[in-house]
Image (cartoon, rainbow, N blue to C red):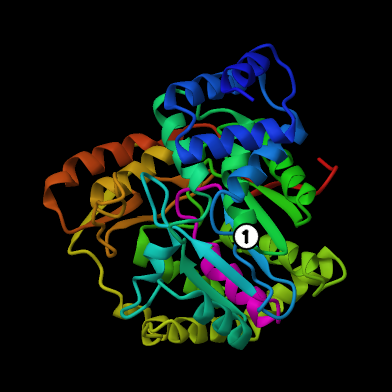
Amino acid sequence: MRMYDCILAKKAGRELNREEIEYIVDGFTDGSITDYQMSAFLMAVCLKGMTGEETLALTMAMAKSGDMLDLSPIVGKKADKHSTGGVGDKTTLIVGPIVAALGVPVAKMSGRGLGHTGGTIDKLESFPGFVTELSEQDFFMQVNRIKLAVMSQTANLAPADKKIYALRDVTATVDSIPLIASSIMSKKLAAGADVIVLDVKAGSGAFMKTEEDAILLAKTMVEIGNGAGRKTCAVVTDMSQPLGYNVGNSLEVEEAIAALHGAGAQDLMDASFTLAAQMLVGAGRAGDLKEAYGLAQQAVADGSAFEKFCEFIRAQGGDDGYAKGTKKFPRAGIETKVRAERAGYVCRMQTEEIGMVSLLLGAGRQTKESKIDLSAGIIMRVKIGDYVEEGDVLATLYTNDPSGVEEAGRRMLAAVEISGETVEKMSHVLAVIHGGEG
C-alpha cells in the first residue's frame, strides 16, 4: 500500500476502505507518511468529501492512535456531553451536577480555553485548591462514590487528531465537515462514555456560522457515535449571542451557581435542562424526554443538584465555601460600563468579537502557554430583542490590565447592534438530532 495511491484515489473521488484509512492515520502518526503527503490527502478530502463509512473509519483510527479509556470499573451507564465551543458556555458546570444528582455517572475529560472559547478546566480552577490532574484510579473511584468527576485531558488521548489538526490549521483544511466531525468524535470515543450528548453551536460565536451547517455537522457526529456503538444525540443551539450573561472564568462559575439555584438566564436554563434530559434518557434514567426534563428541573428546585456541585468541588480539593458565597470570588479591579449611544432594540451581536474582547481583558489565552486572569471578563446586560434607551448599560467589562480598556470598550460597543425596528426574542434550542433523524 502506498500513500501516493491513497491520495490519487481520494482526488478522483473514490471511497477508501478501512484498511487504507488506518494505513494513512497510523503512518502519519508514526512519521512514515510525510506532512506534505498528508496535506495533499487532507485537501483532497476537503474537495471531494467522505462517505459516512469513511468518516467513521477515520474517527476510529484516530481514537485508537492513543489511549482508549476503559470506564468499565465505573458502575452503570456513563454519560458525557461535549460542546463545539462558544462564548459564555458554562453548561458542563450545571448539567454534570444535575445528571449526577439523579444517579447517572458523569465521567468527563475537559480542556482549557483557547482563543475566544472558554475551557471548563479553567473555570473550575477558579475554586482555590481545585485539582484537575487525577489518576485513572482516583477518577474512577470518585465517579463511583459521588457520580461526577471532571479531569483534564490526558496527553495521549487521540494523538493522531492533535497531529492532523496542527497540519489542517496551516493548510486551510479546517473547514471540512468529515474532518471536523472525526476530530471531535475521536476524542469523545477515546474518553469511553456509553452515552454521548453533543451541544453543537450555530451562529456568529460558533465555528459553524449557519444553522444548516451546524445540523449537518451534528448529523455526521451522531452517525459516527451510533456507528461506533455509543448512544449518541446532538442538540443544536444558538450562539448568535453569548449564552447567559457572564463571559469569563469566575464570572461564569458565579452564573452557573445561580443557575443551580434556578436563577439562571432563560437561554442558559433551557440549554442545561435540554442537555441533561438527553443524557438521562440515553442512560435509561428516564423513559422519555418529558419525564427527564421534569427530573432535571426537580433536581434544581429541591437543591440536590447544587449539593452535588458542592460535593464535587470538595472531592477534587476545592473550597466549596466559594460556591455557597460567591462574593468570595475576586472581581478584577478595573470596571468599565459600555453604554448604548442610541435608543432602540438590540438586533444583532458579533458574538465571536465579544469573545475576543474577553480575551483582550485577560480572560482568555491566545496560545496554550498564555496565562489567564480568572477574575477578568464581561457581564452582558442585554439580549437580542431587548429595548434600550440611550445611555443604558449594554455590558460591564472587568480587567486588571489598564492597557486594553479603551480598545475593549470600543470593540464591545461595535459588537452590539441596535435597530429602531422591533426584534423578536430568539429560541435557544434550534434542533435535536438522533440517529437517522433530522
On the image, which quarter does residue 223 sit in? top right
Q: Position of residue 432 (x, y in %)?
A: 75, 49
* Residue 308 vs residue 229, the one in the foreground: 229
* Residue 117 appears left or right of 92: left
Q: Decide whether residue 102 is among the magenta residues.
A: yes
Q: Is mark 1 on a helix, strand or loop?
A: strand
Q: Which residue is at 38% across, 82% downward?
A: 318
In the image, farthest residue toward the top: 12
* Residue 425 vs residue 298, the one in the foreground: 298
Q: Mark 1 points at which residue?
A: 81
User: Which residue range is magenta in the image?
Assistant: 84-105
* Residue 277 vs residue 131, the one in the foreground: 131
Q: Which residue is at 56% across, 22% downward?
A: 41
Q: Decide whether residue 55 is among the magenta residues.
A: no
* Residue 69 appears left or right of 432: left
Q: Quadrant of the N terminus?
A: top right
Q: Quadrant of the C terminus?
A: top right
Q: Which residue is at 68% across, 57% downward?
A: 197
Q: Position of residue 120 (x, y in %)?
A: 45, 62
